[in-house]
Amino acid sequence: MAYESMICETVALRGHNGDRITAYTARPMGPGPFPGVVLIHHLPGWGEFYREMTRKFAHHGFAAISHNLYERAGEGDPDDVAAKVRAEGGVSDEQMAGDTDAAVAFLRDQAYTNGKIGVIGSCSGGRHTYFYVCTRTGIDAAVDLWGGRVVMGKDELTAKQPVAPIDLTPSLCCPLLGLFGNDDRAPSPEQVNQHEEALKKAGKTYEFHRYDGAGHGFFYHHRPLYRVEQAMDGWQKVFAFFNKHLAA
């Protein structure tokens, strides 16, 4: 068997407005070059699941980084920090994009990456992922895992989220993979339909897969939401998609 090992470490980045934020990185041992993946965490926060997910990408041959969008809310238990952020209306789209720019730049600066970058996020991170790749260029692939609030009514817009990401669809810069549970309500199947229709209308390259018997967060093995068969199939699709678009 081939020898397997990886390097994992916490690094400091300069995020939005030059603020110092923390990120967790993982990559296979060796010179590479490896394709890069940026993970945008969900509303439950920058916790254990996203560190595991970062290492999972390294295990599959990617250089991965997950940055802490909630750094400014303070340290402590991720659930407590996330609760504080949620009470404050979440992070702004502008701040999220600036922080994600820093994570993308970190990967681009590493000699072990191949120059290709993908972005993935779940839940609020799925929304953030879609917003990001509709407002930036130079990203090679994106994965939206059941991102809620891509479709937003006017009454849902806020100062921190002043634009519905679906309205930015004509500016989508890369191929998109979307995975959704048909029992989910955020996004609902009807909202996923609206999202897909916007992608078709704009002539974008995308794949949407919808799973019966699955709701929100069906990858989350640490929660009752987990659906093993749907998650296994979904992970296969994620890695196939990124390998297709990020291989040198």
Image (cartoon, grey):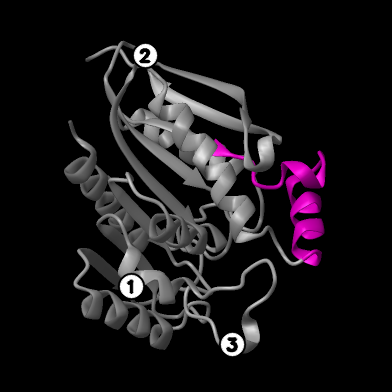
| Nearest to viewer (mark 3 / mark 2) | 3
Give 85 or 78, whichever is nearer the viewer.
Answer: 85
Residue 135: give x, y in percent of width and height.
Answer: 43, 58
Residue 19 quadrant: top right
Residue at image position (29%, 12%) is 3
The CA span between labels 3 and 2 is 48 Å
| Nearest to viewer (mark 1 / mark 3) | 3
Q: Element under label 3?
A: helix
233 vs 48, left or right, is left
The CA span between labels 1 and 3 is 29 Å
Residue 207: give x, y in percent of width and height.
Answer: 23, 65
Residue 21: give x, y in percent of width and height.
Answer: 67, 34
The amino acid on which the numbered mark 3 sits, given as a three-letter code, is: Lys
160 vs 223, left or right, is right
Numbered tag placed on residue 154 in the rendering: 3
The amino acid on which the numbered mark 1 sits, given as a three-letter code, is: Tyr
Q: Is there CB contact under 8 Å for labels 1 and 2?
A: no
Badge 2 is on which residue? Answer: 29
Q: Element under label 1?
A: strand
Density class for disc 3 (Cα within 10 Å; few <14, some 14-19, many ≥20) is few
Badge 1 is on which residue? Answer: 211
Residue 228 quadrant: bottom left
What residue range appears in magenta? 66-88
Q: Which of marks 3 and 2 is nearer the N terminus?
A: 2
Residue at image position (47%, 41%) is 53
Numbered tag placed on residue 6 in the rendering: none
